[in-house]
Amino acid sequence: MIGAGMGAMAAAARLAVAGHRVAVYERTETYGGAVRRFERDGFGFDTGPGLLTLPAVYRDLFVKTGKEPLEDVVELVQVDPAARHVFADGTEVSLPNASRAGVVAALDEALGSGAGERWGDFLVRAREAWDRTRRPLLEEPLWPNWQVLAEQEPYPSVPHKRLLRTRRAGTPAEIGAWELRDERLAALLESHVLGYGLDPRTAPASAAVLPYMEHAFGTWYVHGGIRELARAVYERCVQRRVEFSFGAEVTGIVAKDGRAVGVELADGTVAEADHVVADVAPARLRALTEFPLDEDGDVRPDPVSPPPGRFTALLALRGGCEDRAAHRTVVHAPDSQTELDFLVSPGGDEPVCPTVTVLRPDDPALRPDDAHESVVVSAVVSTEAAWEDAGTVRRYTDFLLEAAGSAVPGLRERLLWHEVRTPEHTENETGAGFGAVPAPALAAGGGRFLHPANTTRLPGLYRVGGWSHPGGGLPHAGMSGALVAGLIVEGPDFRGSQ
């Protein structure tokens, strides 16, 4: 196993239970990939994902790999409200967790009569897209005829008449303009899409499944931070006698007679294996083997190069969190179009304030005492911006602090210190070029939003984690581990998770 990310560990635990001897080689000094923690002066912060959707993926992992269920090793807390949104015009709305009626009522009250119904109707259509794609895009290995997924748009757009022509929305931005018909509802939809590093103007309409997943299955927090989930998965692997080697960089994949038979480490040693599973970005995987992994007709992810990353500020505050403060607040960009333009083409223009997410866990495990608070503020940003320049970092820090003031009363006066993390930090921790963050796989879009299959053209070599099918995000990474384990244990006839 190359890498100790969440996908790799999910596969490792399942393979160990199936009777395989599993060895994991991780080039850094810890597990979890992007799921990490920063600690200082009694404060703790998640530096990767801060919330969990689809916890059933990890519940299934723990059911299949041992007697202790997930809830016995971590404390899952349903976040309510799911999010508070502060729109560019100053309008605010708090959306309850996993309650269609509650969301409809909240939107009607905040945005005006009819807004909630339009959003509710959109969620019904998004459910259709989810039902059509859940199996092939989350629970099954990538189809050999994946072109079917690439060509067919599963989102049932509402016909829109314009200038004697009938059109159907093909992107989230068009869904917002033609079906939601309110700039704030459009911003609500687009923030879900942007949060995964996707441009709502070019992503397929099938991205509607992203807000639907959160709505249908809820938003969850792990007490102590999401890093506790990574710890629990790692400890389950150790209990199943998975062997971990940290500070052990794999420099090559050994092939013999047209099959992967082991890995070569930086110190020159070779570890033999019946199967090699790689939890690394595509460019890194190609560099590890001389065997041609890609050919014409293979899945080609979105050619935008490189994909976006994240800029994060970790805030240590004096004073405790006020009662009933929202765990998550999304502060929408004052100019969303300019934000998106800069995201895909940062050269030459001055950056603008992005859409900012503020996480306030109010978790005693993440602060020195009740007289303090730890807050994580983040935004999706271009990985091509000049992150080595102190002025760029300072400008984005100011953007985030200014936006966070809408979520945290008296923020500037309460700030004890802050740490910032740029895409360069992500690159160092995950090995992904430029610090890019993978998005979940989506149908339609000509296949540009799919990810390479878990199997490769080199027999015995498998892909796992966010850069392979079914893509990025904690649930998807966990499912990639289940798919790879199934392919190894059951062989090419494996048809997916049950």
Image: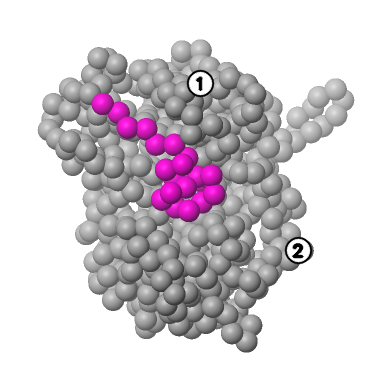
Task: Report the residue that reaches farthest toward the top.
Answer: 89
Residue 430 horizontal side relative to residue 30, left or right: right
Question: In the image as oriented, which residue stretches furthest toward the front?
Answer: 267
Residue drawn 27% across and 52% down?
228
Tell me the kind of residue under disc 1: Cys
Q: Residue 233's image quarter?
A: bottom left
Q: Identify the mark nearer the N-term, 1 or 2.
A: 2
| Figure check: 420 above or below 307 | above
Distance from the alpha carbon under mark 1 to that under mark 2: 40 Å
Q: Residue at left 42%, top 23%?
A: 394
Q: How crowded is mark 2: few (under 14 residues within 10 Å), some or many (20 or more)?
A: few
Report x, y in % for residue 310.
47, 37
Residue extending furthest toward the bottom: 257
Local SS, label 1: loop
Q: Please, what secondary structure does the residue beneath circle 2 have?
A: loop
Q: Say whether residue 367 is visible.
A: yes
Q: Is 63 located above or below residue 165 in the figure? A: below
User: Label 1: few (<14), some or many (≥20) within 10 Å?
Assistant: many
Mark 1 lies on residue: 353
Q: What stretch is highlighted in magenta?
A: 417-437
Image coordinates of residue 208 in percent, x first then y, are 58, 41
| Vertical relation: 290 (above or below) 406 | below
Q: Name the quadrant containing residue 229.
A: bottom left
Which sits in the foreground, 276 or 121? 276
Q: Name the residue under label 2.
A: 297
